[in-house]
Amino acid sequence: MKIKAALAGNPNCGKTTLFNVLTGSNQFVGNWPGVTVEKKEGRVRKNPDITVVDLPGIYSLSPYTLEEVVARNFLVDEKPDVILNIVDGTNLERNLYLTSQLTEMGIPVVVAINMMDIVRRNGDKIDIDMLSIHLGAKVVEISALKETGLDEAIEAVIRAAEKGRRIPQHNFSGEVEHALAHIEEALFHDLPDEEQRWYAVKLFERDKAVIEKLATDKSILAHIEKDITHVEEEFDDDSEAIIINERYNYVAKILSDCYSKKNKNGLTLSDRIDRVVTNRFLALPIFAAVIFLIYYISVSTVGTWVTDWMNDGVFGEGWQLFGRFIPGIPVAVGELLTKINCADWLQSLILDGIVGGVGAVLGFVPQIFVLFLFLAFLEGCGYMSRIAFVLDKLFRKFGLSGKSFIPILVGTGCGVPGIMASRTIESDRDRKMTIITTTFIPCSAKLPVIALIAGALFNEAAWVAPAAYFMGIAAIVVSGLILKKTKLFSGDASPFVMELPAYHMPPLKNVLRSMWERGWSFIKKAGTVILLSTVVLWFLQGFGFENGSFGMVEDLNKSVLATTGSLFAWIFKPLGFGNWQSTVATFTGLIAKENVVSTFGVLFGSAEVSEHGQEIWTALQAIFTPVSAFAFLSFNLLCAPCFAAMGAIRREMNNWKWTAFAIGYQCGFAYCIALIINQFGSFFSGGGSLLGFAAAALVLAGLLFMMLRPASRKEIKK
Amino acid sequence: MTLKDIKVGHKARVLKVNGEGAVRRRIMDMGITKGVEIYVRKVAPLGDPMELFVRGYELSLRKADADMIEVTSL
């Protein structure tokens, strides 16, 4: 018998661990239709007839958050055979609140109480049989981490599926039941008995989504409205609150029968950790230390060692393995191509285009993996939500949420997963704002550009890199202040109602899996978007009109790329880099930011450039002044990110208009800042023009006004 | 009196959850309902949000949202 089981439960209850243990590597990851919430499906390892669908972690089945709507639509529309409800045994009350909603849908439920090892260690007792009777669902004890009780859980799922659908058993108080009976009678008498209940409760709650979906007749709605108001008067509360209260009372009553806690007031280890970590004086220093450590290890030391090895060894000349010299991929591929007498143009396409382009990006993979390893650990152990807790007030000021810090931090590694990390932000408004501002922070691909400019024009001054980060942070703050005052983002402040889960050591398997999934999506991007764009770029810079005919060109200045570049160079004249080389470099930077370095390399006739591009420093000094170079750097750091990140923006916004707005805003903002830097800079260093100075002053005044003006009217009213 | 006025280390009982829509529903879904006892464990280093102990777990809530919850001090 084929069984489709939905895995449902609160966030932080061990759902991911259970799903991974049950399905192993038989997983398919996709998206729920129409939304960006991730959907995972897998077959049970020991019993491939059972397909498990991992629902998003949810606290309730309300119509308000994306995850909850996705979960309940799946349960109502696709009607899985069984719901496997995983419940955190150390946090029964709130977890069973969700259970009380799941058991109402007419779908057989198996309740798996997780973390039983911890429950037992604490000396707490759960009467499983009694609980089972109360809930009207089979209850099993498991530990996803220790992998105990899993066979029993699967067995229970099969049994429940065999028994089939059943009429929900939980009853609300008399008055509510009365109203529910009326609603069922008026509307749902032709639905199967076991499905009536859920719809009736939702109509009682005046759940807009359900009312719309059913397209209920207005006169019937008016009729049941009378019943609802009657109950509301009786309880002196609104129907939504009545239902929630009744559910929690129901859960509390069950627990008084089935659960005894041994140690009521003692501090757990997690409490003691939290006392230090979110302590009033220590919280911020500890936070700074953690971030510094992660950054130092993943970007400055380990990450760089491995990245250098990748760039200079594997994708460079070659490297040593136990004393044997292994040639780098370009060398090896080059030799191979020569040996088989490959045509020159094809050899150039493969070596300069594909291997060079994709290799440059893949070089960052180790760094990104190390960073993701740390982030997965921080998320898994519960510290991420403390970061949000500690920083919320600060970010609130800029119209962002405490959770915005996470995408920005991830964004220092790579903007794509950074933008993807914004998914954890519930409020639509905060999420959009975070997506727009995240890529202002220099990602690891921007580091070579910073190094190039610092080396070529600033004598490798130590202040350039910190200045770039500072500018990124300032851009986020300023944009937050500007955007939150626009009409687009005014309106209701978003809630910040967040669980602070108990600290625990995340299973190594989960951490590695999360690191791998994110890292892999980066590699896939390198294999698709970047591969394609490097080929296109190679074509554009290799071909052009020479001597009246189109073909491969010897002189790069005649290539399509150069022609197009000079066509657009005027745009950047006010910014101080209106030459075609910088224009082309800026364009290729859209493919991947580190391309800026290799493009200059190619344009100045030095085929092989090292990561910092020492070979072309002199050439750069000829086309840039320090001021215009800094303007160039600022523009390239702040303007639209690479194509892959733009793709991520499009995916997360799920809307072309917002994507266009985000990218347009980023470019516009970058232009303004670069203009101010170049015009003020050249004016005060003795050059420049009065007109340019005036224009820059005007732009600056405009930005300041946008930033400091009173909030749009809607927000004042609040 | 609202939850916002409760000092760190003190307890309160919820009388009513004001407000409307998603925020209110969310607060109630997380277990802050009429009659429940809440312990204010701490306030974040920058003065907001608050950390509460309710129904056996830790919940953080901004003061602006805590202001929607009518309580009586215990």
Image (cartoon, rainbow, N blue to C red):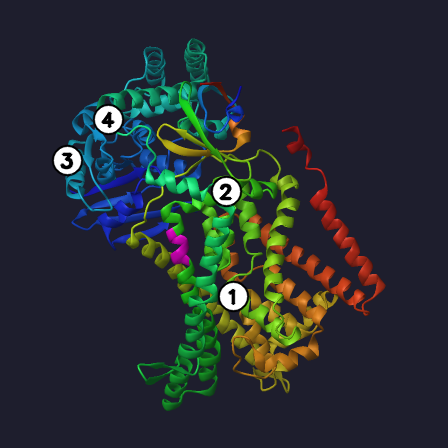
Residue B23, percent from left and from top: 49, 30
Looking at the rendered structure, the kind of residue marked 4 is Tyr
SS label for mark 1: helix
As measured in the structure, the alpha-carbon distance from the residue carrying label 4 to the one carrying label 2 is 34 Å
Residue A3 visible in the current orientation:
yes
Looking at the rendered image, the disc whose residue lies closer to the viewer, 1 or 4, is 4
Report the front residue among A1 and A636.
A636
Kind of residue sitting beneath label 1: Ala
Badge 3 crowding class, 10 Å Cα cut-off, few under 14, some 14 to 19, many 20 or more, is some
The CA distance from mark 2 to mark 3 is: 47 Å
Q: Amino acid at mark 2?
A: Val
The residue labelled by disc 3 is A159
Residue A445 image label:
1
Q: Do discs 1 and 2 belong to a common subunit?
A: yes
Classify mark 1: residues with Cα within 10 Å, few (<14), some (14-19) or many (20+). many
Residue B1 located left or right of residue A341? right
Residue A577 visible in this rendered orientation of the protein? no
